[in-house]
Image (cartoon, rainbow, N blue to C red):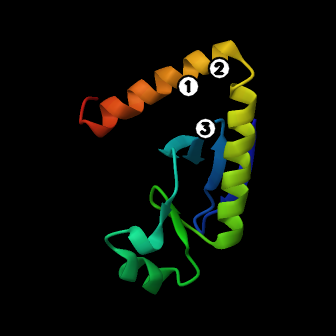
């Protein structure tokens, strides 16, 4: 089940699907980053002054961040109750680690 967070200016949908944040149906991020901690925070605030977090390349305002956090928390609680989903979470974590280490 997907939770719509927002529609971008160019019409693409940013959604939370399980434990992933997807843009137009494609993986964008697994977590949020505070704009204040981003290396390009000033440039981001120039373009989107109300941005508090980033989901990959997409800026999010405070209300949108709450939607994402709530959807991720709900997905995580469902996963913790399902053994098949727990295995999938481990598989995704391994893929994320490989991607972070530069292994495609």
Q: Nearer the viewer, residue 22 or 73?
A: 73
Q: Quadrant of residue 83?
A: top right
Left or right side of 95 for 48: right
In the rendered structure, which disc, 3 or 1, sits on the residue that comes first in sequence?
A: 3
Q: Marks 3 and 2: CB-CB under 8 Å?
A: no
Disc 2 marks which residue? 85
The C terminus: image quadrant? top left
Q: Residue at x 55, y 75 (%)?
A: 51
Left or right side of 30 for 74: right
| Residue 92, above or below 101 | above
- For label 2, the crowd category at 10 Å Cα-Cα, with few meaning under 14, some 14 to 19 and many 20 or more, is some
In whole angstroms, how far apart are the C-alphas of marks 3 and 1? Answer: 8 Å
Q: Position of residue 75 (x, y in %)?
A: 71, 36
Q: Residue at x 38, y 82 (%)?
A: 42
Dot 1: element: helix
In the rendered structure, which disc, 3 or 2, sits on the residue that comes first in sequence?
A: 3
Dot 3: element: loop
Residue projecting furthest to the left: 102
Q: Which mark is residue 89?
A: 1
Disc 3 marks which residue? 19
Dot 2: element: helix
Q: Residue at x 65, y 62 (%)?
A: 65
Q: Residue at x 37, y 80 (%)?
A: 43
In whole angstroms, how far apart are the C-alphas of marks 2 and 1? Answer: 6 Å
Q: Quadrant of residue 40?
A: bottom left
Q: Marks 2 and 1: CB-CB under 8 Å?
A: yes
Q: Quadrant of residue 86?
A: top right
In whole angstroms, how far apart are the C-alphas of marks 3 and 2? Answer: 11 Å
Q: Nearer the viewer, residue 24 or 39?
A: 39
The N terminus: image quadrant? top right
Q: Marks 3 and 1: CB-CB under 8 Å?
A: yes
| Residue 103, above or below 45 | above
């Amino acid at each position: 089940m997907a939770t719509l967070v927002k529609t971008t200016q160019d019409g693409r949908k940013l959604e939370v699907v399980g434990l992933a944040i997807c843009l137009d149906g494609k993986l964008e991020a697994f977590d949020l980053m505070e704009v204040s901690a981003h290396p390009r925070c000033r440039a981001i605030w120039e373009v989107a002054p109300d941005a508090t977090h980033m989901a990959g390349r997409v800026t999010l305002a405070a209300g949108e961040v709450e939607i994402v956090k709530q959807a991720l928390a709900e997905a995580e609680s469902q996963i913790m109750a399902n053994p098949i989903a727990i295995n999938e979470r481990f598989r995704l974590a391994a893929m994320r680690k490989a991607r972070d280490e530069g292994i495609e």
